[in-house]
Image (cartoon, grey):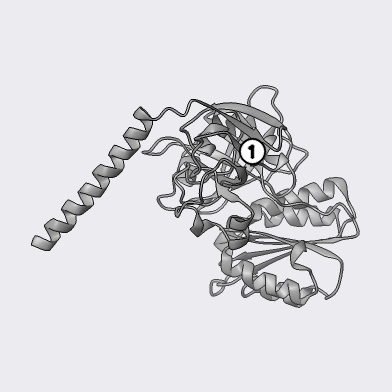
Amino acid sequence: MVYLWAILAFGGLVVLLSLVLIIAEKVLINYGICKLDINVGEKPLEVDGGQTLLQSLFANQIFIPSACGGKGSCGHCKIVVTEGGGPLLPTETPYLTRKEQKSNVRLACQVKVREDIYVRIPSDLLSVKMFTSTVSISETMTYDIKLIRLKIDGDEKISQRPGQYIQIQAPSPDGPVFRAYSISSPTYEDDSVEMMVRLVPGGIGSTFLHELNVGDEVIFTGPYGEFYLNDDPETEIICVGGGCGLAPMKNIIFSIYDKWPDRSCWLFFGCRGTGDIFYLKEFKELAKKHPNLHVVYALSEPEEGADWSGETGFVHLPVDKMLEPDLERQAFLCGPPLMIEAVTRVLEDKGIASDDIFYDKF
């Protein structure tokens, strides 16, 4: 018992000292106005010193991806700090590769602005906007997936590439947080965005979205993402998804056939059972109009006696069985990590270069 009290006392002292240091920095240290230079003069700013880099950018309508709300637990807010960021912190190293550390990549939520600071941010992120929107559709797709469409308020438009995502602002006990969701609506729909949201038990973002009603207001930022669709119509597109990983695939496929009606594309989608199937009818209807679209759903755990004559087993198996090797291709994958790893091995065996395989794990 004595040891327990000693440990508790020591822990309390550490917490107290930490609070004192935080308060002292805010009250006693005034860093004044600091220069924040983005991309060598492309966007010079003046900001209040003492904030994190992420807070300073957000205050100036520059939205860096951050799923954890700046708590340093997601590792998404990576940008290059060329000067003025101070030493790399222990809270950053778990999220940065050695190559990133040598290239001055930092977590914007951990870097404090204490002096003039110089950063490099991808141009795409400088065009990210904050939108207010209204729920126009909230439709049940399966027992745990909803399709939610957000109509952007006013005359604002969103310009997105196939496969990108947005970040929804959701309430939490610690204040507003942002959660990322793929855009399932095609690129030619610029006045709204659509998502396919799986309900995660206890999930802040998915619970918020599943409880929304038509007419409710939602704030989001976007678009984000590094998917780049090859514009050469002779390059065959391979889309592989699992669960809510169908969302970016729908965006990619409908965008493709709006621009290239004869382009070759394969969709492989993995489900557990027949209760997890959704959007199959819509893809089959699209395939009737565009014969070069091949739609393959696979059930990994089909129910006994289920009315299913399609593929069975994990989704990488029909990918391996149906794709011929050594064609000019680009692939987009979205789903669980094990699925991504298995499908990637198959695609590389088929001759697709790793640089032509884009993926999003969740």
Query: Residue 238 versus residue 54: which sits nearer the camera?
Result: 54
Residue under numbered circle 1: 222
Q: Residue at x 76, y 57 (%)?
A: 284
295 over 147 or under it: above or below: below
Quarter the C terminus occupies: bottom right
Q: Is residue 188 left or right of residue 200?
A: right
Q: Horizontal and vertical percent for residue 221?
A: 60, 36
Q: Horizontal and vertical percent for residue 230?
A: 83, 54
Whether residue 93 is visible: yes
Whether residue 140 is visible: no
346 over 290 or under it: above or below: below
Q: Horizontal and vertical percent for residue 35?
A: 59, 29
Amino acid carrying mark 1 in the image: Gly
32 over 201 or under it: above or below: above
Give residue 158's quadrant in the image: top right
Q: Secondary structure at mark 1?
A: strand
Give residue 136's quadrant in the image: top right
Query: Residue 74 versus residue 273: which sits nearer the camera?
Result: 74
Residue that extends furthest to the left in the rendered view of this protein: 2
47 over 255 or under it: above or below: above
Q: Circle 1: is it few (<14), some (14-19), or many (20+) Cα within 10 Å?
A: many
Quarter the N terminus occupies: bottom left
Q: Residue at x 32, y 39 (%)?
A: 21
Q: Horizontal and vertical percent for residue 195?
A: 61, 44
Label total for image: 1
